[in-house]
Image: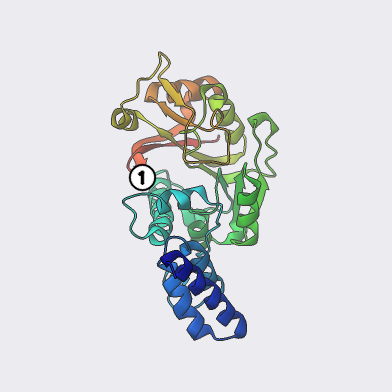
Amino acid sequence: MTSEQNAIFLLQHGEALLAAGDREAAAKLLGAARSDARTRLAAHNLIERHQLADRFGEWMGLNCEISPEDDIYRFFDGHPTSINPLRDYLADGWRTLAELMLLLESAGKPLLGVQSFLEFASGHGRFTRHLVKAIGAEKVTASDVVPGAVDFARETLQVKSFLSAARPEDLACPERYDVVFVLSLFSHLPESSWSRWLVRLYDCVAPGGLLVFTTHGEEAVRRQGVTLNADGFFFAPSSESNAIDAQEYGTAFTDEKFVQMQIARHIGADRVLRHAPTWFWHHQDAWVLRKQ
């Protein structure tokens, strides 16, 4: 039996034991299957879903199921520095929560006081699951252009969700929110839709609320060695996502002047509450806009 065949046997036999009601024996076999890259995610989800021993959810206190369609998980799973992709993926969502909480505190709007929160371009819940633990699923709405991501958020994480649109003008936002959080969308948009999405998402913010979004700013430009155009913008049709057209979702870099100009032109320069360079993941800038 090859190592791959053995991993598949462990997964299948563990699942059969689970169906037969032998949870202890199933947990041992599925735990072994989880250590093999080829059966890791399937075994992990069975362990989490059935609340078996040694599950991540037992010590994290949240739903740790991961969608097989999650591009961000696949990024960790294929990254040469990630020796434990499951842990790294879940810890990265926790890191984002910590970074956001500090940012909102500095903006005078503590996360725990937020009554309605839209996570836009939410993906398959890398951050959403941690947000649910912090403020409750009833206050969270997730939106993404990928239908499966929206379904996963609603069915697995129990949050409200709605499907985004390819064009910002077609986005139907069901309400206005205290906080609209847009992590790593503007760092992927082409110049043709960048300001259009800015205007549309700002419109989704309730009066007195905040729009928080991130960009690849000047430090990211330096690290990647890209050359910005005369407007302070660079776009390459390539990203970690396999679900969206690369011409509409690639990798974008901007300088501070470009972002400030778009805000001033389309929303108002006085709406900028905070610009925090390299705030998220130590390479994406954070921008905080307040709605009057």
Q: Is residue 143 visible?
A: yes
Image x and y of residue 85, in percent: 40, 58
Q: Residue furthest front?
A: 1
**Residue occupying the point 65% across, 60% down:** 155
Q: Is residue 42 placed above or below 151 in the rendered structure?
A: below
Q: Between residues 153 and 43, which one lies in front from this camera angle?
A: 43
Q: Is residue 182 left or right of residue 90?
A: right
Image x and y of residue 183, in percent: 48, 42
Q: Is residue 26 placed above or below 201 in the rendered structure?
A: below
**Residue occupying the point 55% across, 86% down:** 22
Classify 10 Å Cα crowding around label 1: few (below 14), some (14-19), many (20 and above). few
Q: How is the image coloured?
A: rainbow
Q: Residue furthest top?
A: 230
Label count reads 1
Q: Is residue 281 placed above or below 215 in the rendered structure?
A: below
Q: Is residue 61 visible?
A: no
**Residue occupying the point 51% across, 30% down:** 189
Q: Between residues 90 and 102, which one lies in front from this camera angle?
A: 90
Q: Between residues 105 and 222, which one lies in front from this camera angle?
A: 222
Quarter residue 87 falls in: bottom left
Image x and y of residue 117, in percent: 56, 50
Image x and y of residue 122, in percent: 55, 47
The quarter in which the N terminus is drawn is: bottom left
**Residue occupying the point 50% across, 64% down:** 64
Q: Between residues 60 and 235, which one lies in front from this camera angle?
A: 235
The quarter in which the C terminus is drawn is: top right
Residue type indicated by callout 1: Trp
Q: Secondary structure at mark 1?
A: loop
- Residue hosting label 1: 281
